[in-house]
């Protein structure tokens, strides 16, 4: 039985002002005499019925310049990252990023005292300036293909302007982000995709820290306590809860070390501060351990999840955009597979051997009629894949067929393109890079957490 279901599918630090990298103490709202800033973040975990340490960050600073940032996070999976900053005569030359998944270096090229280019192994950004020395244009390339174009305009001062970013996928405009910046602070932002438009506005206190964040019709408020020099030592940050769509408080506690050796604040969990904002919490117990996987375990888990085995399946496009497919024995199995197509790609399920294979850009001109192409074999730990239609509607695919979509719901995470998938109201899976891919796998939450 041959069946094709047609769906039209589209599918390390970000900066909001006209600066290319954050590397000064002032970029982190720290006073010039700070040499070390240690902070810990906590939130209430309803599953544990206690507060949980979710993130730690230590910033090392010399003479106002950041030399290293160490970060540990434990949201959906345990992650470690260390950024090391290198300078020549006060100019930033490179940032070396190391995680348990690997390491890479961002290198900066300077011209006339300004950064003209930033590059790493995967990306290159080229910067242009106007006659007054203001950043006017940024173009981002991946393997020589332009993937993002950013323009800076309407300067009222060097720190007040507008910023417009256009991201491209398959040479088509995919996402537009528009920002208004005043005095170096992001005031408003509109993000437009083929599926939705999101508008956000921000307010700040005299120390330039965000006190209010409005996301469509939801308002989130933050509170801070400072040392005598305006450095944050305690904070309460409202964010969107991944499960309930309600507001949840995240608390940070910080220890500040100055160049004279004196300190202010503590990075320990302060229950009295928490009670000011979570007065009706079910518990004020706290877990301060991360329970992280070893490097070997994590690398093996991710390798298993992301492995794409070399496929022995071949596919040929016919004149009417139908297909013919052969297995490893060069036998035609076209009538023994199910297929789901997106705007560009085709996902084929071999019913006999229970394998899913993919050919990207099958429905584009680069795949020519009458020629054979090798397919990628997709490995999914759940046997499930996702795809977006144009509506927008979210579809779940298993064994070449679409499941009952009413059982599944997407819940946004802190990362823009990552989503938790609820099955029958229960958090079950995570999907990555939702807006940048066609077909992709479901990763089980329990497997990643372990």
Image: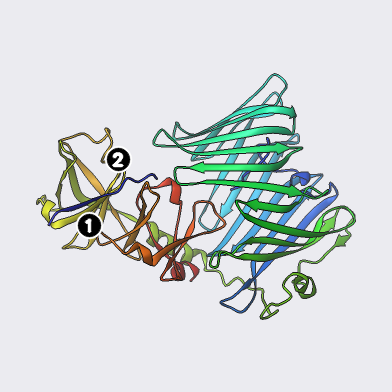
Q: Which residue is mark 1?
A: 349
Residue toward you, 233 or 207:
207
Residue name at image x 39 percent, y 57 percent:
306
| Residue 110 seen | no
Work out whether 294 lies above or below 126: below
Residue name at image x 55 percent, y 64 percent:
242
Q: Which residue is mark 2?
A: 361
Number of residues whose C-alpha sits closer than 10 Å to that of mark 1, classed few (under 14), some (14–19) or many (20 or more) = many
Residue 23, given in percent of the width and then of the height, sits at 71, 43
Work out whether 302 lies above or below 115: below
The answer to whether marks 1 and 2 mark residues whose Cβ atoms lie closer than 8 Å is no
Q: Element under label 2?
A: loop
Residue name at image x 35 percent, y 49 percent:
389
Residue 267 is left or right of residue 249, and the answer is right
**Alpha carbon of mark 1 to alpha carbon of mark 2: how far?**
17 Å
Q: Quadrant of the N terminus?
A: bottom left
Mark toward the start of the polypeptide (1 vs 2):
1
């Amino acid at each position: 039985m041959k069946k094709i279901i047609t769906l039209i599918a589209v599918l390390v630090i970000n900066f909001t002002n006209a600066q290319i990298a954050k590397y000064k103490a002032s970029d982190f709202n720290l006073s010039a005499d700070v040499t070390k800033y240690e902070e810990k973040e906590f939130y209430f975990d309803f599953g544990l019925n206690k507060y949980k340490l979710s993130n730690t960050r230590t910033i090392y600073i010399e003479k106002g310049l950041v030399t290293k940032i160490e970060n540990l996070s434990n949201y959906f999976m345990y992650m470690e990252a260390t950024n090391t900053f290198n300078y020549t005569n006060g100019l930033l030359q490179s940032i070396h990023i190391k995680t348990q998944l690997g390491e890479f270096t961002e290198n900066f090229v300077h011209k006339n005292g300004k950064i003209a280019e930033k590059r790493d192994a995967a990306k290159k950004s080229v910067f242009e300036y106007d006659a007054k020395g203001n950043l006017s244009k940024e173009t981002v390339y991946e393997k020589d293909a332009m993937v993002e174009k950013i323009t800076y305009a309407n300067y009222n001062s060097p720190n007040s302007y507008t910023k417009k970013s256009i991201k491209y996928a398959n040479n088509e405009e995919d996402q537009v982000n528009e920002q208004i910046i005043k005095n170096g602070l992001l005031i408003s932002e509109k993000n437009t995709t083929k599926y939705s438009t999101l508008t956000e506005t921000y307010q700040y206190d005299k120390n330039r820290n965000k006190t209010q964040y409005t996301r469509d019709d939801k308002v989130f408020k933050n509170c801070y306590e400072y040392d005598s020099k305006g450095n944050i030592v305690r904070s309460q940050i409202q964010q969107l809860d991944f499960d309930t769509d309600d507001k949840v408080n995240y608390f940070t506690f910080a220890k500040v070390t100055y160049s004279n050796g004196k300190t202010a604040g503590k990075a320990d969990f302060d229950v009295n501060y928490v009670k000011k904002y979570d007065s009706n919490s079910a518990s004020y117990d706290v877990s301060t351990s991360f329970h992280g996987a070893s490097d070997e375990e994590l690398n093996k888990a991710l390798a298993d999840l992301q492995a794409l085995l070399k496929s022995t399946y071949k596919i040929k496009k016919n004149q009417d955009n139908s297909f013919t497919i052969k297995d490893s024995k060069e036998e035609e199995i076209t009538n023994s597979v199910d297929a789901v197509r997106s705007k560009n790609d085709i996902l084929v399920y071999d019913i006999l051997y229970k394998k899913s294979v993919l050919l990207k850009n099958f429905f584009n001109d680069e795949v020519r009629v009458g020629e054979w192409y090798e397919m990628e074999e997709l490995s999914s730990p759940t046997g499930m894949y996702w795809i977006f239609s144009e509506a927008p509607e979210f579809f779940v695919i298993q064994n070449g067929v679409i499941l009952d979509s009413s059982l599944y719901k997407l819940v946004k995470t802190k990362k823009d393109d990552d989503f938790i998938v609820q099955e029958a109201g229960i958090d079950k899976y995570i999907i990555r890079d939702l807006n940048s891919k066609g077909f992709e796998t479901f990763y089980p939450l329990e497997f990643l957490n372990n």
